Image: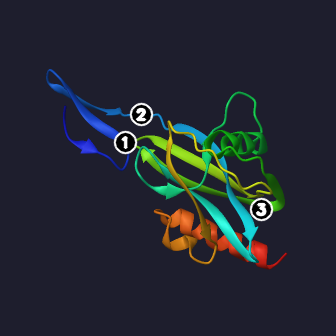
Amino acid sequence: MGPVNKAAGYRAQKTGVFCYWKKEVNTLKFEKSCGALVYRKKHDQLEILLLKHRYGGHWSFPKGHVEGNETEHETALREVKEETGLTIDLLEGFRHSVEYYPRPNTKKQVVYFLGYAADDHTKRQEEEISEIRWTPLAEAHREVTFKNDKNLIQQAKKFLLER
């Protein structure tokens, strides 16, 4: 291996007395997940459902990979049901996505909706979720781990207050 010109994606290759540049191609893998910020109204206060993920230990929202020909809504509803046991109603007009790189050469998009839980009795998916907690919406940004999730909570607050 020879010197690298990373900006152009080339690496020098030496064969005998000749040197040539070979373009390195890193294939970017794309993943897509969908989920929901689930809320309820309890004693005239809005609360949001937070999950502590068993792998990673972070607090976030229910979400998971799109399967087969599922729509974004179908994926979000299925994942909420699987991870929390809740059946929710998705609100029209709230759709936000975040993108990040969970691993090298992997870009992930997660689309979130806002969903209302009429029945708030949860049953966590033990294989993936270590804890479930209803948290006052006004305090939830302090509980979640990632900045993207803090931003989503702000968007949900704004959306719900403008309704």
| Residue most extreme to the top | 16
Label disc, if present, on residue 135 of the rendered structure: none
Residue at the image position 67 percent from the left and 69 percent from the top: 47
**Tag 3: Cα neighbours inside 10 Å, few (<14), some, or many (≥20)?**
some
Q: Are marks 2 and 3 in contact (CB under 8 Å)?
A: no
**Tag 2: Cα neighbours inside 10 Å, few (<14), some, or many (≥20)?**
few
Label disc, if present, on residue 9 of the rendered structure: 1
Q: Earlier in the sequence, mark 2 or mark 3?
A: 2
Cα–Cα span, label 1 and label 3: 39 Å
Which SS class for mark 2?
loop
Of residues 158 and 127, the one nearer the viewer is 127
Residue type at mark 3: give it.
Phe
Q: Is residue 163 above or below residue 126?
A: below
Residue at the image position 69 percent from the left and 74 percent from the top: 157
Of residues 152 and 55, the one nearer the viewer is 55
Residue position marked by numbered label 3 in the rendering: 94
> Which quadrant of the view contains residue 31?
top right
**Tag 1: Cα neighbours inside 10 Å, few (<14), some, or many (≥20)?**
few
Q: Is residue 69 left or right of residue 148?
A: right
Residue 154, image x and y in percent? 63, 73
Q: Earlier in the sequence, mark 1 or mark 2?
A: 1
Residue at the image position 62 percent from the left and 66 percent from the top: 152
Residue position marked by numbered label 2 in the rendering: 25
> Which quadrant of the view contains residue 90?
bottom right
Residue 52, image x and y in percent? 49, 53
Where's the C terminus, which quadrant?
bottom right
Residue type at mark 1: give it.
Gly
Of residues 23 and 63, the one nearer the viewer is 63
Q: Are marks 1 and 2 in contact (CB under 8 Å)?
A: yes
